[in-house]
Amino acid sequence: MKIKPYGDTLNDGSIQMSFTLPMSLSAKAVQTAKEIGKQMNLVDPSVVHAESVGDNFSFFIVYGQTKAIVDIDKIKVVEIQKTEHSKSDIEKLIKDNFDEEIVIIGASTGTDAHTVGIDAIMNMKGFDGHYGLERYAGIRAINLGSQVTNEDFVKIARQEKAKVLLVSQTVTQKDVHLKNLIELVELLESEGMRKDVLLIAGGARITHELAKELGYDAGFGPGSYAEDVASFAVTELIKRRG
């Protein structure tokens, strides 16, 4: 099945994009934004919004039509294999299968100062009506916050006998955080801990496929809640116990 984006009518190819230019807002800047749309092969690009965003910078929204068409039958993605469980279902699974609490440790590691994602998963209040792991019976959730070095993360994980390690990362365009994610895997392997823990990555630009490529057991992107992470973690731990 082949599809195109659409705006007004199905498969009309209409798209909207936004970007910032390093030049002051002016007629020349608006024409430059339109020219960028043309060079991206948009048909009849039009600038529908323009505003100044500070000295020598301007922001634009451009509409246009793309000729791109995708056969979705040829799209292959790597998805997490897990059964969706509610909070109460997860708590029952833990009660029925474990004699002690499951320790889950989470942090934004390296230079990453963003904690919105890890807080949404870990903190008791959770996010968007989904309680965080701190509220789950049978789970001891430890949120270390941001800018935690890989060395400290591994050290505390060992001290707390954590079974699940959650790493939140904002993957940058310069791939600095990808390097940090890889270094954590290498550190766990050098410490002989990798096989004993579930290692999970999360963040706005993290996919399950990317996480697997980096040596993680799973990756969770935008729109994931505590029960998504807990469903995977608890069922995977049960599976590994045999």
Image (cartoon, grey):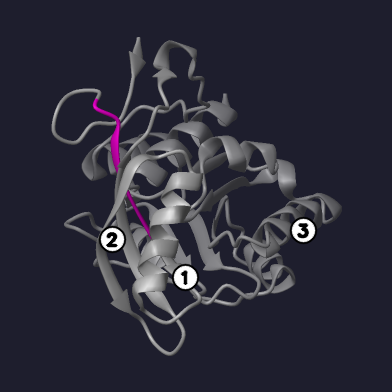
> Residue at coordinates 22% horizontally, 54% vertically from top-left?
130
Say which amino acid is labelled 1.
Answer: Leu
SS under mark 3 = helix
Q: Is residue 28 above or below residue 130?
A: below
Closer mark to the observer between disc 1 and disc 3? 1
Q: CA distance from mark 1 to mark 3?
A: 35 Å
Give the extent of the magenta segment. 12-18
The chief SS type of the magenta part is strand
Q: Provide the residue designation for mark 3.
A: 183
- Report the Cα–Cα distance between label 1 and label 2: 45 Å
Question: Is 125 rendered above or below residue 46?
Answer: below
Three-letter code, disc 3 = Glu
Q: Which residue is mark 2?
A: 135
Q: Earlier in the sequence, mark 1 or mark 3?
A: 1
Which residue does the image show at 58% across and 57% down from the upper left? 162
Q: Position of residue 87 (x, y in %)?
A: 25, 45
Counting labels gives 3
Asked if residue 84 is positioned above or below residue 190 in the image, the reply reads: above
Q: Secondary structure at mark 1?
A: strand
Disc 3 versus disc 2: distance between alpha carbons?
A: 31 Å
Q: Nearer the viewer, residue 34 or 213?
A: 34
Q: Residues within 10 Å of mark 2 (few under 14, many from 20)?
A: some
Q: Earlier in the sequence, mark 3 or mark 2?
A: 2
Closer to the N terminus: mark 1 or mark 2?
A: 1
- Res. 21 mark: 1
Horizontal side of 9 relative to 96 (left or right) equals left
User: Which residue lies at the image location 30% right of the left edge and 59% below the top edge?
Assistant: 61
**Seen in the image, is 185 located left or right of residue 71?**
right
Horizontal side of 21 relative to 197 (left or right) equals left
